[in-house]
């Protein structure tokens, strides 16, 4: 009889490379940690550590019956690798070629296993931002002329927050996407792994679940663009909403959109407990404060990341998602942007109109009174960084979402112990009403207004800046 394999510890059955998608299964465990008490703790490292500890403890105990069965299957040659996860509580199982169905059948009915699912493919939301790497198709291959402040950053009022010395300082934004060009001039100074002398350390700041590559890279370009909009920029290229925040990144998408449930699960779990670049030594005290998710799934019934998002939120990590690019029809908002209770973002243009491509509600997961998407942000021809030191424009709810991730960073600096409910209320109640009068399924509560949202938080004392801020650097 084998002991349960604890999450993020050396396992007798190694995790399989993600190339073996066709014969990977996800065995979900129906036992979930009660995180009620942890969610009441103050935001910060202690809360993240407490949530992590409870999740790991619950996973180790509840996965034991499944691990015993999997050891039998390994001995028979039907299973070649197993990876234990704590967020969600699940086991990633790699079967021998041709044994997929037999392994799935053997796992069904084992104690605590509630579902045996395939390793699905997910994607960056479809046109108009297109598959990652298709910049020429989207922009005509032209680079941006130098800008002072990107139009979307200015539209939502971020420069007025900077004038108050609220720029996201002290907040970490996690990017789950195609990667990050940490050497890009507009990214380097904002990447958490960059020291004052310009040298970089990537442990706990970067994760590649595909191949454990130790140096950040972006083979799709999408992630660098998203990261730039949330917290990037240099003098003369103010492209980011929260230039004082720090960026970390977990790669969940390869190249032009090759990502799977397992890759995304690994990336999101890492946001709670970042590791060394080789995936070892998790440390939840270094977890993200906000996670941007500019990716989605055309299957509107897919609830596979709800448990993960709930765990992140319990740890005090705000979750921001793109609503999707399947509009303008009703009911086109897609997972995970369709999950209620988080920050689901529709896309607007320079004229404060919801773009035609932006996915609309209602969401299949929403209950009466829950508005999904709930907020809107700039998402048409948004200028930002792309790999290789370039700047180009893209359109999509993928571009709107990081505007809101940056806004959350500003709000968390303005009031570090603001609750999730207070953050939602601050943004939703002060949003600029656009599209149809009142809240609607296209723009949610409206286009975000940074200063109004900050004021709504009733900050009692203006934060003391770490440095004079005339222009984001």
Image (cartoon, rainbow, N blue to C red):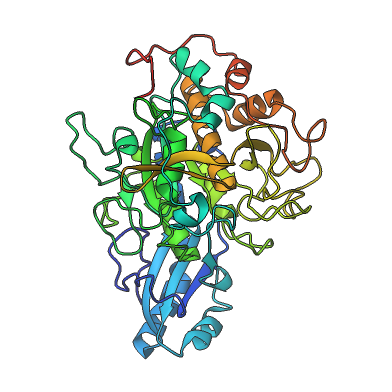
76 up-or-down from 189: above or below: below
Residue drawn at (53%, 81%), measured in percent from left and top?
104
Drawn side of residue 316 relative to residue 337, left or right: left
Locate residue 24: give its quadrant: bottom left
- Which is nearer the eye, 308 or 405? 405
Number of disc labels: 0
- Which is nearer the eye, 112 or 324? 324
Residue drawn at (59%, 58%), measured in percent from left and top?
126
465 up-or-down from 445: above or below: above
- Which is nearer the eye, 360 or 6? 360
**Quarter of the N terminus within the rendering:** bottom left
Locate residue 182: give its quadrant: top left
- Residue 110 picture location, percent across and down: 54, 76
Locate residue 196: give its quadrant: top left
- Residue 373 picture location, percent across and down: 69, 43
Residue drawn at (45%, 53%), measured in percent from left and top?
135
**Quarter of the C terminus within the rendering:** top left
Is residue 183 at least partly visible in the picture?
A: yes
Is residue 60 at least partly visible in the picture?
A: no
- Which is nearer the eye, 252 or 313? 252
408 up-or-down from 135: above or below: above
- Residue 91 picture location, percent across and down: 45, 68
384 up-or-down from 387: above or below: above
């Amino acid at each position: 009889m084998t002991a349960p394999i604890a999450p993020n510890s050396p396992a007798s059955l190694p995790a399989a490379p993600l190339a073996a998608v066709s014969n990977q299964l996800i065995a979900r465990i129906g036992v979930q940690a009660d995180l009620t008490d942890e969610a009441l703790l103050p935001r910060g490292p202690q809360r993240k550590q407490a949530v992590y500890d409870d999740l790991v403890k619950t996973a180790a105990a509840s996965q034991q019956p499944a691990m015993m069965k999997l050891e039998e299957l390994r001995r028979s040659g039907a299973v070649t690798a197993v990876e234990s996860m704590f967020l969600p509580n699940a086991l990633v199982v790699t079967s021998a070629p041709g044994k997929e169905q037999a392994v799935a059948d053997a796992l069904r009915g084992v104690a605590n296993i509630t579902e045996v699912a395939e390793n699905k493919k997910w994607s960056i939301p479809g046109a108009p931002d297109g598959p990652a790497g298709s910049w020429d198709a989207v922009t005509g291959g032209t680079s941006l002329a130098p800008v002072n402040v990107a139009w979307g950053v200015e539209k939502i009022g971020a420069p007025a927050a900077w004038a108050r010395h609220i720029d996201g300082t002290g907040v970490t934004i996690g990017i789950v996407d195609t990667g990050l060009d940490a050497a890009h001039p507009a990214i380097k100074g904002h990447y958490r792994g960059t020291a004052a002398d310009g040298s970089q350390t990537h442990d706990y700041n970067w994760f590649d679940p595909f191949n454990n590559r130790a140096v950040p890279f972006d083979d799709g370009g999408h992630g660098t663009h998203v990261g730039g909009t949330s917290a990037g920029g240099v003098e003369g290229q103010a492209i980011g909403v929260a230039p004082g925040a720090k960026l970390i990144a977990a790669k969940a998408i390869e190249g032009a959109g090759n990502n799977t449930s397992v890759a995304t699960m690994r990336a999101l779990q890492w946001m709670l407990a970042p590791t060394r670049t080789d995936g070892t030594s998790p440390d939840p005290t270094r977890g993200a404060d906000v996670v941007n998710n500019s990716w989605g799934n055309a299957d509107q019934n897919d609830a596979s990341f709800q448990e993960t998002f709930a765990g992140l939120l319990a740890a005090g990590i705000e979750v921001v998602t793109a609503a999707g690019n399947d509009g303008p029809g009703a009911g086109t908002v897609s997972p995970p942007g369709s999950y209620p209770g988080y920050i689901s973002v529709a896309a607007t243009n320079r004229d404060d109109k919801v773009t035609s491509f932006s996915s609309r509600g209602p969401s299949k997961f929403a209950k009466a009174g829950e508005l999904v998407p709930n907020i809107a942000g700039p998402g048409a021809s948004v200028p930002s960084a792309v790999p290789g030191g370039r700047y180009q424009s893209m359109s999509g709810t993928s571009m709107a979402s990081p505007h809101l991730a940056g806004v959350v960073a500003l709000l968390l600096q303005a009031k570090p112990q603001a609750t999730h409910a207070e953050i939602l209320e601050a943004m939703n109640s002060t949003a600029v009403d656009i599209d149809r009068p009142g809240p609607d399924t296209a723009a949610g509560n409206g286009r975000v207004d940074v200063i109004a949202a900050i004021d709504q938080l009733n900050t009692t004392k203006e934060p003391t800046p770490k440095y004079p801020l005339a222009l984001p650097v």
